[in-house]
Amino acid sequence: MKKVICEQFAPIEALKVVDTPSPEVKKNQVRINAKAIGVNYPDGLLVQGLYQMKPPTPFTPGIEVAGVIDAVGEGVDTLKVGDAVAAIMPIGGYAEQVVLHQSIVQPLPSGVSPQDATALMCAYGTSHHALKQRANLQEGEHVLVLGAAGSTGIAAIEIAKAMGAKVTAVASTQEKLDLAQKHGADNLVLNNDELADNLKKIAGNKGFDIVFDPIGGDAFDASIRRMAWNGRYLVIGFASGRIPEFAVNLALVKGFSVMGVFWGSFVQKQPQDYMANQVELFAWYNKGLLKPHIHKIYSIDDVQQALNDVLQRKVAGKVVLAP
């Protein structure tokens, strides 16, 4: 089988695709033939040594896989060969086959495609956790979504709408704004030199109840001053490349909170809440409330191109690898 190897922290071009024997299945484990492998922005940071977590090298990146079980080990009683499943793992997902403990493998509900399943895990999982557990979003609130055409941005729009909110979307091009509108955004704002003024016009005197920010940089500077009383500013990531700073007296005077969102830690520290979230996401999907946008499906051999496209923000929605 093929898998991706990061031999040492280095530019993405140093990643290798190698052929290896199929992994053996041990007690309480299942082996999954991957049909879709999720590609996420942090994957590109991880292999360069730029992420919070630094696993021992060599390693295989990737945290999301959806596919079909082709072998089960002793002690596996809830899953069987032929089951369509999905799983989240710390690393190891960029491979045609993965072996995982049965406890972290979940059956895919009928009607959920493998490609959509990868989006519904990390991207939608991050946005859901941010809006539900961190921001405690209430019906009727106004949510500002930065990076609105990214995988987490589209997810945030759809989830906020499913929870009864009004959504203003910010993106860097009109094409991306059109995509955000297709996924439910009520207001559209181009991320340009007039961003601060345009946000002020939309927010009015009240401000935004929640800001969902995977971008940082100048977009943070423009939106942090548009917070409502008791607002919640969600720090998701820094795709712009600049980690911003702000005068904390703004939070004091305007009475808002700045909240970090680290989905990986949430999964580890609150596994029951994570599983409940996944059940809710799959239910919304089956009701037609969530419709992940799959930007492109790359082969495993094209993993370098896939990661570079994600890091350079050339994509809209979700990127997937497929054997």
Image (cartoon, rainbow, N blue to C red):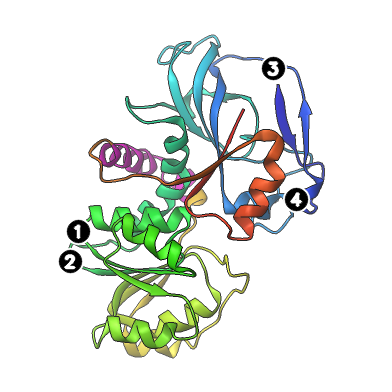
Mark 2 or mark 1, earlier in chain: 2
Mark 4 or mark 2, earlier in chain: 4
Instruction: Determine crowd level at label 3: few under 14, some 14-19, many 20+ residues with C-alpha closer than 10 A.
Output: few
Report the front residue among 247 and 27. 247
What is the secondary structure assignment of the residue under circle 3?
A: loop
- The three-letter amino acid code for the residue at tag 3 is Ser
Give the Cα distance between marks 2 and 1: 6 Å
Q: Position of residue 287 (x, y in %)?
A: 22, 38
Instruction: Determine crowd level at label 4: few under 14, some 14-19, many 20+ residues with C-alpha closer than 10 A.
Output: some
Proximity of marks 2 and 1: CB atoms separated by less than 8 Å: yes
Disc on res. 22: 3
Q: Quadrant of the N terminus?
A: top right
- The three-letter amino acid code for the residue at tag 4 is Ile
Name the residue beneath numbered marker 4. 12
What is the secondary structure assignment of the residue under circle 2?
A: loop
Q: Position of residue 56 (x, y in %)?
A: 75, 43
- Residue 53 visible in this rendered orientation of the protein: no
What is the secondary structure assignment of the residue under circle 1?
A: loop
Disc on res. 14: none
Name the residue beneath numbered marker 1. 164
Tell me what residue is drawn at x 38 percent, y 27 percent. 108
